[in-house]
Amino acid sequence: MTSKLLLLSGCLVLALNSCRSDLENTQADPIDQTTTNLDGTKVHKLLINGKYTYVNEVNGEYFYADDLTISAEQFDKLKMQANSELSTSEKSTIVSSFIKTWPNATVYYTLPSQGTLSTQSYNTFLTNINKAFDLISTGTNVQFVERTNQTEYITFTYTTTNSSPLGWQKNRVNGIKIYNTTYPAIIAHEIMHSMGIMHEQCRPDRDQYIIVDVNRATEGSRHNFNLYNDYAGHGAFDFGSVMMYQSTDFAIDPTKPVMTKLDGSTFTKQRTGLSAGDYAGINHLYGPVNATSAVNGTYTMTTSLATDKNLGISGTTATDGTTVVLNAASTGNNQRFTFTKSDHGYYIIKSSLDPTKVLTVKSGGTANGTAVELRTDASTDSQKWLLFNLGNNGFGFAPKNAPSLRLEVKNGLTTNLTPIVIGTTDQSVQPSTKQRFKLTKVN
């Protein structure tokens, strides 16, 4: 095994340095997909939002990157995103169920059996799994708890590659494969995939920071450089992230790197620990969606249209039917809201003026432009909001009773008392500015 393969986070060796066969099949519209055969590997090429996404299929297993697997269900959702006949709102609903975080920011696990490892190597493996847990939990609110009877959990196996399934999925056990048992940060890298964390070089804003030439990558390795439009980057692009690859990874010729900085210079990767950006990204992905901040945290919701305008209620009393509007920013209770967990991924948004009153779609409506108001919490679907992590753009919100619509400032106006409504999305993932809100913890 070469040192390069030891450092990479998982390698499909049979997919490298081999020849492409004739076209196996071409899917007819409306799904823009082609499939080619590469020495037993099916390479699926999907056109999503004007960009090509590659998925390698090996013996019925789908690789979103060499070390990142997705389920058949997730692959079907990718294909649906490549369906040119689906509306934007339909695609946005699909995206919302592609990646899921772990409920209550708690990842359940079981430790591996010894298998073919020597006793010394096995003990090292166990030690480094726990070090990987510590690397992640030290700077985040994510907890790792040994499984008792939970249905969803992660488990580990010593194999010849490193890989992990993507995110949490109901009724799925995430089997994480580890070759580099002596590297806690590589184990953490794979655990983070199971938490829903992607590779840094695949951020949707990556072209602002690096140049990626997939024509310099070996056959069958282009999936390692997919542009994940269904995900969001948080903070500045992080060359020091434990999730970042280096310039020459998967290069046909190391003198012609696949990735460079904008000035043409190259960069290396690190697998010694999590960066400050990694910790910030995890905390954004799991906040306010972790138990601590969701229960104890109160937030203001600032529109991305203007930094001095918050979502709030008209007046100083919270009664049934009180209108939710945009207003000059303050930290008064009429602009403070507490997020309380409901169904997985969904939250009840309570008013600090009266915690029995919550953000509600008026009369349970599902039409574009329906007003949002305060109503007594009855745990109806029109009072449950799905949070979309938009990275640097904050959060988007979709009501459970109308998942293709988004919380928005009506008509994108910034005048005081502009109504807050639910509206049609004009993009499948990153919604328009009027549908983005920054959450600021105020206590």
Image: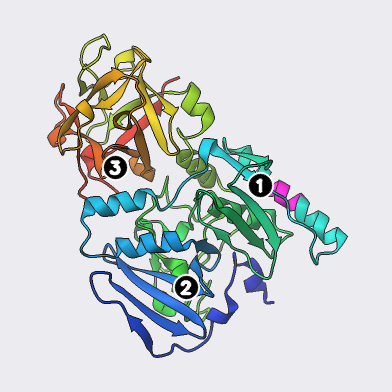
**Structural distance between the alpha carbons of marks 1 and 3:** 31 Å
Q: How is the image coloured?
A: rainbow
Q: Is residue 172 left or right of residue 3?
A: left
Q: Secondary structure at mark 3?
A: loop
> Which of the marked residues, 1 or 2, is nearer the chain's N terminus?
2
Identify the residue at image location x=68%, y=56%: 156
- Point out the frontmost of discs 2 and 3: 3
The amino acid beneath tag 2 is Asn
Would you name the residue on which mark 3 appears? 403
Specify the amino acid type for callout 1.
Tyr
Point out the image quarter for the C terminus.
top left
State whether the magenta stretch is mostly helix, strand or loop. Answer: helix
Say the numbered circle drawn on residue 109: 1
Mark 1 surroundings within 10 Å by alpha-carbon count, few (fewer than 14), some (14 through 19), many (20 or more): many
Q: Nearer the viewer, residue 240 or 313?
A: 313
Q: Secondary structure at mark 1?
A: strand
Res 122 → quadrant: bottom right
Residue 130 colored magenta?
yes
Residue situated in front as seen by the camera: 173 or 230: 173
Tell me if residue 323 is in the magenta stretch. Answer: no
Tell me the residue at 50%/46% (across/down): 277
Does 421 sit above or below residue 42?
A: above
**Nearer to us in this view, 195 or 437:** 195
| Residue placed under numbered mark 2 in the picture | 56
**In the rendered structure, which disc, 1 or 3, sits on the residue that comes first in sequence?**
1
Where are the magenta residues, as a range? 127-132
Q: Is residue 119 above or below residue 358?
A: below
